């Protein structure tokens, strides 16, 4: 009977003894954990059974929403030839990890903890336009809130492809995109949203280095869903960087020298057209402009698909200088060595000296009406214009010889004629005087012809100069208008 009672008591006390032993066994580690720092205890608590290879949701049908934000820090370079944009950005990610949650009261009221990035799950958010790995510092930690919110902040040097339009250089505005998307997960697994409001992202220039060549105008955002060849749908967030080039440096180093050379070319038209200095001056300007283009060729952006308008401007300016030189050569050819030229044709005289002067309001130019040269040239033995007619008594004609003249003078009671040698000397003198008169008339005719050609050249020079000036002004006004519209648009 007593043995039965002892066995019954043992059965009743055995669970109590076992419970006390188990409590003592569990209490010993708890006492040891209470002696560890709260941060270490929290880190061990969160990462003890954490699996970073699994998306951190308790219900697999629930997508993980990644909120992202971008702040532009600097525009490092714009490579127009390779169509590459290099920027430095501050990138921020935010998502909720359901496996990284705790009660702050159990861990000394800790509400935020930094843990290694390699120890937890991180979304595979990449930039689609990446073409090169930039020199970015490595940030090995992330912040975790007690409710599971994970904050991943890191700076990026982003080297991305961008379709650069350089036609408006140096007054160009570029629009490059940074597209953030998950490379593998569909929208059913990872969704993307914007951390801040679009208006705040658009006007945020708080940390932008605004002293470089490029000016940040705005950062536009756009969310969209796209589908690949399969039926899977992906989420992406686009950030459009709108930047504008500061044109002052290029205006001073490229446009002003070209404008000065063109002004000097226009001033060169005021040199006399009959002087050879104008041709030398124009050639010097053309050579100077060629050297200028060689110097600035490395400054101009170059692409395989287009040429900037300023390049077309330089080519047109070179063509205008060549046209100006050709016009100068034509005018110098007209007014130089007129004694080797024919008289001004009647059609050219009527077209230039009459209609051209009327068109340019230069007044009437007196035209000379010379008789033909054959009617002005008397015969060598004609003595009608001789200064020795009084000596010979006006009895010189072609039908009478020296004997008749002698008889005529003797019959009138005149003194005897001079000897025959004197008569021959007088005739030779008459021939010399006639030759001198013919020479003077010919020289006057050449001078008058030269004056005609000089005036034709002068009128043509003024006409071509006005046409050239109108072309330069129209071209300049067009370019200035286009560049002004692009700069202030």
Image (cartoon, rainbow, N blue to C red):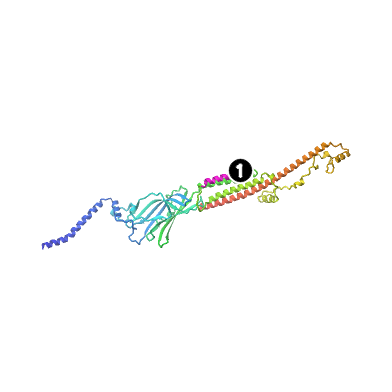
Q: Residue at x 76, y 41 (%)?
A: 435
Q: Where is residue 96 in the image (x, y as percent from the top left)?
A: 35, 57
Q: Which residue is drawn at 72% across and 44% down?
A: 445
> Is 103 in front, or is 327?
327
> Is 402 in front, or is 24?
402
Asked which quadrant contains residue 279, the reply is top right
Q: In this view, does 432 lie to the left or right of 476?
A: right
Residue 286 drawn in magenta: yes
Secondary element at image label 1:
helix
Q: In this view, does 430 lie above or below 126?
A: above
List the residue tagged with mark 1.
280
State whether the magenta stretch is mostly helix, strand or loop. Answer: helix
Asked which quadrant contains residue 282, the reply is top right
Q: In this view, does 163 lie above or below 439?
A: below
Q: Where is residue 119 in the image (x, y as percent from the top left)?
A: 33, 53
Q: Position of residue 405 (x, y in %)?
A: 85, 40
Q: Can residue 266 be seen in this view?
A: yes
- Magenta extent: 276-297
Q: Is residue 67 above or below residue 269?
A: below
Q: Is residue 261 left or right of residue 341?
A: left
Residue 38 drawn in magenta: no
Crowding near the residue tagged with mark 1, few <14, some 14–19, many ≥20 C-alpha atoms within 10 Å: few
């Amino acid at each position: 009977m007593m043995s039965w009672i002892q066995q019954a008591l043992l059965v009743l006390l055995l669970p109590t003894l076992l419970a006390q032993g188990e409590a003592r066994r569990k209490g010993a580690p708890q006492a040891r954990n209470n002696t560890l720092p709260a941060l270490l205890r929290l880190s061990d608590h969160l990462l003890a059974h954490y699996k970073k290879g699994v998306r951190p949701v308790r219900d697999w049908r629930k997508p993980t929403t990644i909120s992202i934000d971008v702040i532009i820090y600097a525009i490092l370079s714009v490579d127009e030839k390779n169509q590459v944009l290099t920027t430095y950005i501050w990138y921020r990610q935010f998502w909720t990890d359901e496996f990284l949650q705790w009660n702050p009261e159990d861990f000394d009221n800790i509400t935020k903890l930094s843990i290694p990035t390699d120890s937890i799950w991180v979304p595979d958010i990449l930039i689609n336009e990446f073409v090169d790995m930039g020199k970015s510092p490595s940030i090995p930690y992330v912040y975790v809130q007690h409710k599971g919110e994970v904050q991943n902040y890191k700076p990026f040097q982003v080297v991305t492809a961008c379709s650069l339009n350089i036609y408006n250089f140096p007054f160009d505005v570029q629009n490059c995109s940074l597209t953030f998307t998950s490379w593998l997960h569909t929208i059913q697994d990872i969704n993307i949203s914007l951390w801040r409001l679009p208006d705040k992202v658009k006007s945020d220039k708080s940390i932008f280095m605004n002293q470089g060549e490029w000016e940040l105008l705005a950062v536009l955002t756009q969310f969209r869903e796209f589908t690949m060849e399969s039926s899977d749908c992906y989420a992406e967030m686009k950030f459009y960087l709108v930047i504008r080039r500061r044109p002052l440096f290029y205006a001073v180093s490229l446009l002003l020298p070209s404008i000065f050379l063109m002004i000097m070319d226009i001033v060169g038209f005021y040199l006399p057209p009959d002087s050879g200095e104008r041709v030398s001056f124009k050639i010097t300007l053309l050579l100077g402009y060629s050297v200028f283009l060689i110097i600035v060729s490395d400054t101009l952006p170059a692409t395989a698909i287009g040429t900037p308008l300023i390049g077309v401007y330089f080519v047109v300016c070179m063509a205008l200088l060549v046209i100006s030189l050709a016009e100068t050569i034509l005018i110098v050819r007209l007014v130089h060595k007129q004694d080797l030229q024919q008289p001004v044709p009647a059609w050219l005289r009527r077209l230039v000296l009459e209609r051209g002067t009327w068109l340019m309001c230069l007044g009437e130019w007196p035209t000379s009406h010379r008789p033909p040269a054959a009617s002005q040239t008397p015969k060598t033995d004609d003595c009608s214009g001789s200064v020795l007619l009084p000596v010979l008594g006006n009895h010189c004609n072609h039908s009478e010889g020296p004997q008749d003249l002698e008889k005529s003078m003797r019959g009138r009671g005149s003194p005897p004629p001079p000897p025959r040698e004197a008569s021959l000397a007088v005739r030779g003198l008459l021939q010399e005087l006639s030759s001198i008169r013919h020479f003077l008339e010919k020289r006057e005719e050449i001078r008058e012809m030269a004056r005609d050609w000089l005036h034709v050249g002068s009128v043509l020079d003024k006409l071509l100069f006005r046409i050239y000036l109108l072309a330069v002004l129209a071209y300049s006004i067009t370019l200035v208008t286009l560049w002004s519209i692009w700069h202030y648009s």
